[in-house]
Amino acid sequence: MHIPDGYLGPQTYVTMFGIMAPIWIKASRVLNRTLKMSQVPLLALGAAFSFVIMMFNIPIPGGTTGHAVGGVILSILIGPWATLLVITIVLVIQALIFGDGGITAIGANCFNMGFILPFVGYYTYRLISGNSPLNSKRRIIAAGIGGYIGLNAAALFTAIELGLQPIISHTDKGVPLYSPYPLSITVPAMLGEHLILFGWVEAVVTMAAFAYLLKTNFIKEWEYA
């Protein structure tokens, strides 16, 4: 799902940085107000988990890749605002050191994977789980559904951003200057792969991690932190 350099025009990537700037500020303020020192190791562990799981990229036709993120299980543990900053750090490291995702596309990638995915997935989980007991099967299933929906929502936004490029930036003869693939290619390619494969990977990873943390009583301490 990482968008590389050269696939988004300046009209798009500058706009995405502009959208993300106040979101990052908001997340920092929330974290400064709510973060406890005892949670710092969990943030580091979450960053490592997300980093590793996102490194397993599979190319997708249309200009990007598919992979799990782990954003929903992190949101359940530390909250979506903290997860946003954790995934942002991971994406910046991946772009600067490993060339996984473009530097100019950091704003867009953070919006898709750091903002859309955790928030959509987390509140889907909260809606489905309701007031059910923490150790109920309903919670585990809700976490999996949240992971599935969150990842596909992020994939949809990625597809739209890429598919709009031929419309936004092209030569006088209509030749695309950046991503050459229209929405008719990017949306089916991204959503098809994620609905059929990667969304289920995210769901299984989220459910397995949730069940394990429940079994070890770890999630009782950290949920809604």
Image (tube, rainbow, N blue to C red):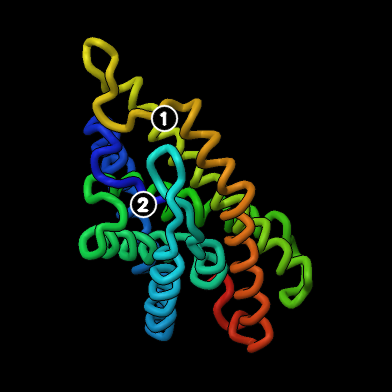
Q: Is residue 6 above or below residue 130?
A: above
How far across and down, in percent of the image, does residue 166 sit? 34, 23
Mark 1, secondary structure of its residue:
helix
Which is more toward the observer, 222 or 110? 110
- Residue 63: horizontal and vertical position, in percent? 38, 41
* SS at badge 2: helix
Residue drawn 43% across the image and 63% down it: 54
Instruction: Identify the image quadrant of residue 73.
Output: bottom right
N-terminal of the two: label 2 or label 1? 2
Name the residue at 39% across, 45% down: 64
In the picture provided, is 166 more to the left or to the right than 136?
Answer: left
The local crowd at label 2, few if under 14, some if 14 to 19, many if 20 or more residues have their Cα within 10 Å, is many
Q: Nearer the viewer, residue 144 or 35?
A: 144
Q: How many marks?
A: 2
Residue that mark 2 sits on: 110
Left or right: 116 in relation to 212: left
Check disc 1 and give the amino acid type. Gly
The circle drawn on residue 163 is 1
At label 2, the amino acid type is Cys
Q: Nearer the viewer, residue 29 or 155?
A: 155
220 displayed left or right of 7: right
Does 44 appear above or below 70?
A: below
Whole-angstrom CA distance, mark 2 to mark 1, is 18 Å
| Circle 2 or circle 1, nearest the eye | 1
How many neighbours does mark 1 have within 10 angstroms: few (below 14), some (14-19), or many (20 or more)? Answer: many
Which numbered disc covers residue 125? Answer: none
Q: In the picture, residue 48 is in which quadrant?
A: bottom left
